[in-house]
Image (cartoon, rainbow, N blue to C red):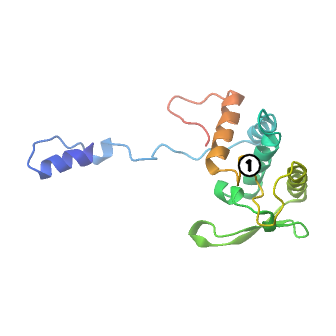
Amino acid sequence: LRGFALWLQSHRIPAYVPEGELIPRRGQYSVPWIFTKRQIAEILDAASGLPNTYWPLRSLTYGTILLLLYTTGMRIGEATGLRLKDISWPDRSLSIRDTKFFKSRLVVLSRSVARELESYVRQRNAAHAPQDPEAPCFWSPRGGKISVVAVRQAFRKVVVGLGWKFPLGVRGPR
């Protein structure tokens, strides 16, 4: 609105230009959400309870992705971009390739998280998912890897399903 009013004035059309401080900037109200351990446990439990209507591994897949995001600090795109070859079982590590700013790094997993990931991969392979080393770790039966949007939607569905109440004007966790 302010930009449009300035454009009008630049073309000699009288217009009121609101002060910059009166107009909120995009994303100004997106505040990081800090979870309690109890909330994380509720999210992970709820993710494991997602209905598997069209895809038997749905709840296991999203539960494993959310667990990795929580325990490693990976970005969603990094988790969905993992390939089978990126997992090193002896080292309990993940190779994160070409991330933000085109960097790569290793992420070491705890024993318990490595066991969960190993369980997921075993069940994924038993479901006849592609097993080529280049295949996506988090595979979608619709073909290819799970999308970032799908993970965000699943997370949102989990949080809404938990029935948490947020103050008016607060979006809640994303």
The amino acid at mark 1 is Ser
Residue 34 in view (yes/no)? no
Mark 1 element type: loop
Q: Residue at x 87, y 48 (%)?
A: 127
Disc 1 crowd, CA 10 A, few/some/many (<14, 14-19, 20+): some
| Between 26 and 88, the one nearer to me in the picture | 88
- Find residue 172 and report its image quarter: top right
Q: Residue at x 71, y 46 (%)?
A: 142
Q: Residue at x 55, y 36 (%)?
A: 171
Residue 45 in view (yes/no)? yes
| Between 170 and 155, the one nearer to me in the picture | 155
Residue 137 point in image, percent of width and height: 78, 57
For the N terminus, give its image quadrant: top left
Number of marks drawn: 1
For the C terminus, give its image quadrant: top right
Above or below residue 81? Residue 147 is above
Q: Residue at x 23, y 42 (%)?
A: 18
- Find residue 76 and report its image quarter: bottom right
In the image, farthest residue toward the left: 12
Above or below residue 159? Residue 28 is below
Residue 164 point in image, percent of width and height: 67, 29
Q: 7 left or right of 20? A: left
Residue identified by numbered label 1? 140
| Between 108 and 83, the one nearer to me in the picture | 83
Q: 120 left or right of 8? A: right
Residue 112 point in image, percent of width and height: 89, 54
Residue 115 point in image, percent of width and height: 91, 55
Q: 71 left or right of 4? A: right
Q: 120 left or right of 170? A: right
